[in-house]
Amino acid sequence: MRRALLPVAALLAAVALSPVARVQASNGDPTPTAPVPVLAASAWYLVGEDGSVLAERNEEQRRAIASITKLMTAIVTLQRARLADLVTVGARSSGVGESTAHLRAGERLNVSMLLRAMLVASANDAADALALHVGRGSISRFVALMNAEARELGLDDTTFANPHGLDATGHLSSAEDATTLVRYALGIPFIRDALGRSSVVLPRGGEFPTTDDLLESWPPLVGGKTGHTADAGWSQAAAARSRGVTVYGTVLGSRSRNARNDALQELLTYGLARYRPIVAIDAGRVYATATTAYGRPAVVLVARRTVVRSVHDRSPLLERVVAQGVVGLPVRRGQRLGRVEVSDGSRLIASSNLVAAAAVSEPGIFGKTAWYARRTARNVWGLVT
């Protein structure tokens, strides 16, 4: 017997995600948002991984950023040199002062070691040696590459004059640009790994600890780059992660090392607190129903699994359900019959197929005959009455 062909209808719904989907605090109320921090720094900027600007002050003010510069030095070096390349340290590099790895003229180290010395111990001599290697003996050529990359990354407030960040005329950036820079740099596996190390060991040079005081004392810190000069004050650009959320922030111009550490931790803590976990997709919820034929039960559509996401506490969320309104028989349990998507603005944060919660069988010939008979009787009775 030929199976009856049933029309397939599409059900489309777009509704705001219900507030009850948000995970509540233990007292039953949403956790209140902390006030925007006022920090012991001259400028700061904080952004979430979704692009939300969470806090800012003097964020576009052009200032010295000291060794935060070395993030760009690492980026350009990784673009144009191999980690195994050997670099011969010159007299110029070994003579660079302040924070150093005590490199000696004539010493040969590979790019990987020099990068770690520069990023972990903030070694100015390592930065200079890398710049001369990549710039084929010319610091100015390397700096030109740094500035070209800054334009590519949209760092409009940034100009570099050297590869290490020591105070120099025109060597300036901003809290906003430094945050963009650290976010990009941490997306590069080698840099992320290096900035997560507590120390670096160099041949004949011994062990050098990280300049990042928060790395071991504050677990949410992913990593970052510190900086300090007379013009820059105490500064740092970094990222922190907790409950599946990452935020990126920069503080510039603190008056002391401890003040910088406190300001950065307060800024990043505030950023992490601005995100809340939500049940974006709930496996226990009925998202739609689809009718069937021959008087059989409707099919209940559910998600396969629950999905929890962390979103900005002020973000409006949109849920979109697309499902078949009528389905042919038989229906298998777990059969895909639709889809649900949850968006935070234009960003998709969760999605899942919608499936049949239970099987619905197709009646046999006698069941179909009985259904047609009942329907015909109802139609006739309707005409009579």
Image (cartoon, grey):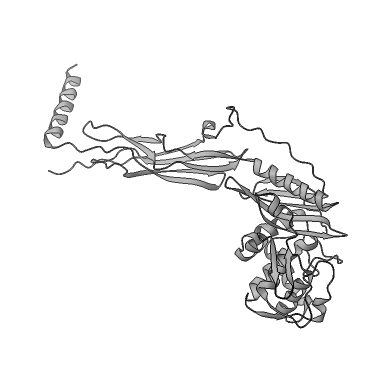
Query: Is 176 placed left or right of 374 in the picture?
Result: right
In this picture, is 327 found above or below 237? above
Extreme residue toward the bottom, this view: 106
Check the picture and name the quadrant holding the C terminus.
top left
In this picture, is 109 found above or below 19? below
The reply to whether residue 71 is in sight is no
Q: For this rendering, which residue is in front, 194 or 8?
A: 194
> Where residue 65 sits: x, y (%)?
80, 59
Quarter of the figure with residue 54: top right
> Where residue 80 sits: x, y (%)?
65, 75
Quarter of the figure with residue 143: bottom right
Residue at 65% over, 44% down = 272
Q: For this rendering, which residue is in front, 79 or 120?
A: 120
Q: For this rendering, which residue is in front, 129 or 1?
A: 129
In this picture, is 144 found above or below 283? below
Extreme residue toward the top, this view: 385
The reply to whether residue 41 is in sight is yes
Check the picture and name the quadrant holding the N terminus.
top left
Residue at 29% over, 33% down = 298
Residue at 50% over, 40% down = 280
Query: Is 12 placed left or right of 238 in the picture?
Result: left
> Where residue 301 sits: x, y (%)?
36, 38
Total labels drawn = 0
